[in-house]
Image (cartoon, rainbow, N blue to C red):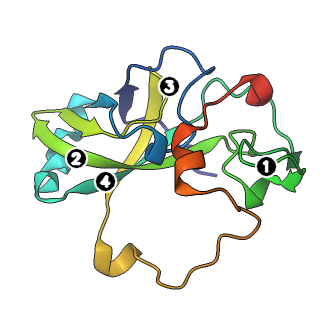
Amino acid sequence: MHTIDPIGVILSPHKSIEDMPIQPKGASEFEGQVIVNEKYIDGLHDLDGFSHIYLLYSFHKASRTEMIVTPFMDKTKRGVFATRSPLRPNHIGISIVNLLKVERNIVFVKGIDVLDGTPLLDIKPYIEQFDVVHNSVSGWLQASDEEIRNKRSDERFR
């Protein structure tokens, strides 16, 4: 089995899990930096041509795994794979953020909903022609855009 080693670290203004935005939609005003290890700097070539990127990262503060969780936007217990909970078997998170600029091995982003010091696993470009899914259905989620923007995390996923 191949192990996944971090390629860098994500820096953000979110110093505590409590009261963080739960998704990038609620973090539009927050800026951060993605520091990529120097040995991967060549991989950043041409990234600055994209408006948005995916950050894949480790929920490094998740201390347990649960198959049934109560998501932030619901009061009903759900299967972990039907949620964005950090309590997944591999504790992997994903966020789409606005790419501001790339300077050497530092990627400046906006819309960051990630805890400061989070290990970065990968970066991928957001490509509208590949990634937009029209007429999608969001399962159990009934929250409005405003409710999602205003929701903040709490202790339930420690």
Instruction: Residue type at mark 1: give it.
Output: Asp
Q: What residue is disc 1 on?
A: 74
Q: Residues within 10 Å of mark 3 (few under 14, many from 20)?
A: many
Residue 99: give its label: 2
The answer to whether residue 120 is visible is yes
Q: Looking at the image, do the residues carrying marks 4 and 2 touch, with CB atoms under 8 Å apart?
A: yes
Q: CA distance from mark 1 to mark 2?
A: 30 Å
Q: Name the quarter where the C terminus is drawn.
A: top right
Q: CA distance from mark 3 to mark 2?
A: 18 Å
For marks 3 and 2 on the same chain, the one whose residue lies earlier in the sequence: 2
Q: CA distance from mark 4 to mark 2?
A: 6 Å
Q: Looking at the image, do the residues carrying marks 3 and 1 touch, with CB atoms under 8 Å apart?
A: no
Instruction: Residue type at mark 4: give it.
Output: Ile
Q: CA distance from mark 1 to mark 4?
A: 28 Å
Q: CA distance from mark 3 to mark 4?
A: 17 Å
At mark 4, the secondary structure is: strand
For marks 3 and 4 on the same chain, the one whose residue lies earlier in the sequence: 4
The residue at 13%/40% (across/down) is 102
Residue 53: give its label: 4
The residue at 27%/48% (across/down) is 98
For marks 3 and 1 on the same chain, the one whose residue lies earlier in the sequence: 1
